Image (cartoon, rainbow, N blue to C red):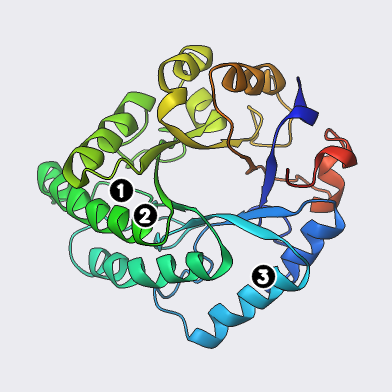
Amino acid sequence: MGYPDQRFDVNLSILFTELPLLERPAAAAAAGFTAVELWWPWIETPTPPQAELDALKKALDDVGTQLVGLNFYAGQLPGPDRGALSVPGTESDRFRANIEVAADFAASVGCTALNALYGNRVEGADPQVQDALALENLVLAARAADRVGAILLVETLNKPESPLYPLVSAPAAIEVVDKVNAATGLGNAKFLLDLYHLSMNGEDLSQVIKAYAAKTGHVQIADNPGRGAPGTGSLPLEQLLDELKDAGYAGRVGLEYKPGDRPSAESFDWLPASARAAR
């Protein structure tokens, strides 16, 4: 057990950001990783030109990196936004325009997990109206994901850093997951369990793992405090990942941490090089 027994991937939207997007897969491969994930890379548009999608696919393929997770369009992320699908008006429309684009790209690179960030509460908008819109859009996203053999992920964030985001507990995200599955009958909506966000919310991480491992489709980690690499804070991440495995979780663990003041390639010293390639 321990870190060498896990299946890790690198989030290229928070690590290797000192490099242009198309150079990051090669940098991850040079560090020993063969699986990566991404937030939606084109924050300005839900529908980038096909040439840009093709260029990203080529950058992944050329170095043999497997994209294992991709966000749908989520607004300005990094930035003030936390998703678009529950935001009435233009942002919801942009999310819908992105659904098939993201699903088709995922299919083109063999990515089987699509993350749909819920979006912030909007001043003047009725939360019930936002939640109804969210369910409509998540149902559309779940169906698109199913069409390409992927799961749909719903993520809990943390209240201190995302005060307007309504899903700031594991049960809140699980409730949405259950509603989507009930509406579609597909069963492909899953929980994205991010140990950093949950710890920032003060949740009992071992209890969350016991309660929700069976509904978890993907895991992400960073240490707390600081959202740095494992070992830079006080979270018992190695133990928690072992607990997840013992609870039946056999999926990947996304490294979604900040490298700090050093180059990203130097932030993996906690993980033996032999344990970095996808298995």
Q: Mark 2, residues whose alpha carbon is within 10 Å: few (<14), some, or many (≥20)?
A: many
**Earlier along the polypeptide chain: callout 3 or callout 2?**
3
Q: As drawn, is 78 to the left or to the right of 177?
A: right
Residue labelled with disc 2: 83
From the image, tell me which residue sits under label 3: 21
Q: Quadrant of the N terminus?
A: top right
Q: Does 153 appear above or below 219?
A: below
Quick check: marks 3 and 2 in contact, CB under 8 Å?
no
N-term-proximal mark, 1 vs 3: 3
Residue 60, quarter of the rendered image: bottom right
**Mark 1 to mark 3 CA distance (whole Å):** 26 Å
Q: Amino acid at mark 3?
A: Leu
Mark-to-mark CA distance, 2 and 1: 7 Å
Circle 3 packing at 10 Å, graded few (<14), some (14-19), many (20+), is some
> What secondary structure is found at the residue carrying circle 1?
loop
Q: Which residue is mark 1?
A: 120
